Amino acid sequence: MRVVGMMSVVNRKTKSSFDADAVLLVLLAVEVNSCTPGRMSTTAYKVKHSLYSRTKLLTVPYNIDNIFRNQKLDLSLQNLLHLPIFTEMSEVLFLNLSHNQISIIKNRSFLGLSCLKYLDLSYNNLSEIEHRAFSEVGEIQGLSMSYNNIVRFQVGIFTNLTNLQELLLDHNKISTIQNKIFVGLQHVRTLHLHNNRLSVIEGGTFFETGLLFCLDLHSSNLSIIIPGQFSGLLKLNTLCLNDNNILVIENGSFSELQNLLRLNLTGNKLVMIEETSFSGLLEICNLHLSHNKIAIIRKGSFFALKKLMFLFLNNNNIISILTNKLFTEQNTLFHLSLENNNMSVIGPRSVVGLGKLLHLALFNNNISVIEVGSFSELSNLNSLQLQQNRLFIIKNGSFRGLIKLQKLYLHNNEISVIESGSFAGLHKIQRLNLQHNQISVIEIALLKPLFGLKYLALFHNRISVIRKGSFSRQANLCELGLEHNNISSIEKGSFIGLTSLYSLFLRQNNISAIENASFTGLRSLVRLFLEHNRIFAIESGSFTGLSKLKELYLHHNQISVIETQSFIGLSDLHGLELSWNNISILESGVFAFLPLLSTLILATNRISRIDRDTFLGLTSLKQLHLGYNNITLIQVGAFDNLHSIKDITFSMNRLTTLSPDIFVNIPRTPGTQIKLWLSDPNFLDELDNQWDCSFLCWLKYEEHHKTIKVEHIPECQDGENWSSVQCGDPGEFLLFIIDCSLGGNCNYIRR
């Protein structure tokens, strides 16, 4: 590649007349014959620096390696007002001129780019393109002029682009597309015209683009589709007409699109679907009609769509699908969306002919009744969504025939009665959602047919009692949600049969006590949520049988007493949450049966002291939260068993000092620190611990030796910040340094 007449052009320019065109001549001085591709010749460097020093234009790239590499010339983001002159640049295959300020493309602007394959002119100010602008780039395959100000094109402007496969004209101001405007584009496969101001597409416009595969016209202000608009598009696969103002689809509008697979008409103003609206669409498999105003669908509207697989009719004004046997011929349909309409009744004739349907969405309608046998022909249905309706009763036989159903959504209705046998035959169901209803009783026989159930949501109902054996057939259930009900007690044997249960949610009920063996049978339970109840005591053996439990949540209750053997059997527990209770005394060894516990939260209780054996057995504990209590004393040796402790919170108590001996016997590994939280900066100082200055001096010394890290720096009793305390001679205080730098056992050095 070489530049013709470079110096002569430069010499004709005056200092005042230099513009982007002249500056960018430098970019053309890539002599492939004398330099390796992507490198600049000596002459080019001289000219480049000469132009830069004379014009001071910041748009001159200093290193041409950044703009020409691997046959790609990148001139984007250069503030160009005009196109540069390209001469004998046949090596360039990719030219990027995007994000500049070019407003016009003149005839033969790309002379010299004879081998160009891809041209990007997006994000400029293009408003005028002369008739022969692209006459010299007949090999081009991809052309983008998106995001410009183009209003119209001259007929024949694309005549020479016979190899073009992708043309992007979106986000312009095009108002009219004249007939034969695309003459010459016989190989174009993708055409984007969306986000323009189209009001008219003349008949025969696309006649010359017989190989077009994808045509995108969304958000283009179209108001009507008429016969002949898409003539010649025999190979079209995808047509996007969504988000326009289309009111009517005239008879035969799509009749020539015999190979169309996807048609998107979402977000228009369609009110009615006529019997012949989609005639001729023999191969269509995906039809989007959502977010219109469709209230009427004529009989036979979808009869001709023999291969339809996905039909979206959601967010319209459809009142009923009972009449006209709308889907009689749709035995290939897999997915039908009818949510967000105005339907009130589902009857036996509603879904006739949908034998292969897998997913049916009917949520957010006004459905109050499901007639017996309504879904009897949907033998392959996998998912049924009926949530957010007005159902108040589920009748026996409502789901008859759904032998392959796996997901049933009935939440956010007004269901108070579920007749016996309502779920008969649903042997493969895995997920059942009944939350936010008015169910008060779980009949023992109700769930028996659902032996494959894995997820059951019953929260936000009115359940007060869980009868023994209610879940006896749910051996595969993994998650059970019973929170936000009126359950006051848990009877022994309530959960017998739930051998695979992983998570049990009982929060936000009225449970007052946990009796011995309340959770018998839950041998696989890992997470138990009992927070926000009225539990006042935990009896010994309450959690017997929960040998795999890892997380136990008991916060926000009224617990005042925890018996010594309350947690017996929880040998695998990792996290215990007991905050926001009324605990005042912790019996010695109360946590002794929790060898793997790593997090213990006792904040916001009424604890006044921590005794020597309070945390006996907690050798795996890493985080201990004691904040927001009434603690005035922590005995020496209280933390001796905390071999793994990393984080202790003392804030918001009534402590004034901590004996250094408290930390002496904690086994430590080399390089580790204990992080202490001594105060809470979010509250007034007088509500927090009132630390003695001598204790803070000890902390100051210990932190200096990196044995302790203090978070939320407290103040002394007199208000002096510990970091500025005048501690005097360290020998005046009883100080301990935990030295783990030597490896092996840590050395405790008394000062």
Image (tube, rainbow, N blue to C red):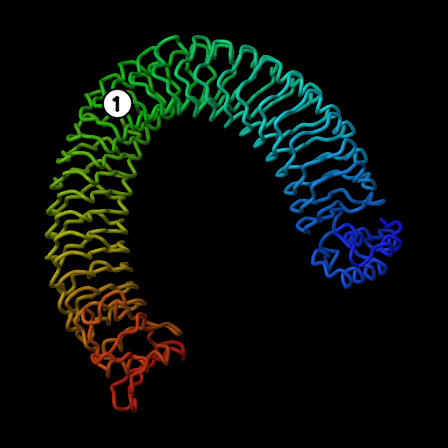
535 sits left or right of 72 in the view: left
Q: Quadrant of residue 594?
A: bottom left
| Position above or below: 597 against 751 | above
Total marks drawn?
1
Q: Residue 50, how many percent across, how many down?
A: 81, 62
Q: Residue 641, how many percent across, how many down?
A: 24, 69
Q: Residue 280, how many percent across, how many down?
A: 57, 12
Identify the residue position indicated by label 1 in the image.
423
435 sits left or right of 123 in the view: left
Looking at the figure, which quarter contains the C terminus?
A: bottom left
480 sits left or right of 316 in the view: left
Front residue of 260 and 168: 168
653 sits left or right of 104 in the view: left
Front residue of 417 and 170: 170
Front residue of 258 and 624: 258
Front residue of 509 and 687: 687
Q: Residue at x 74, y 23 (%)?
A: 183
| Position above or below: 319 against 382 | above
| Position above or below: 60 against 406 | below
Within 10 Å of disc 1 (Cα), the crowding (few <14, some 14-19, many 20+) is: many
**Which kind of residue does numbered mark 1 sit on?**
Phe
Check disc 1 and report its element: helix, strand or loop.
loop
Q: Residue 174, how many percent across, how many down?
A: 62, 30
Q: Residue at x 41, y 15 (%)?
A: 355
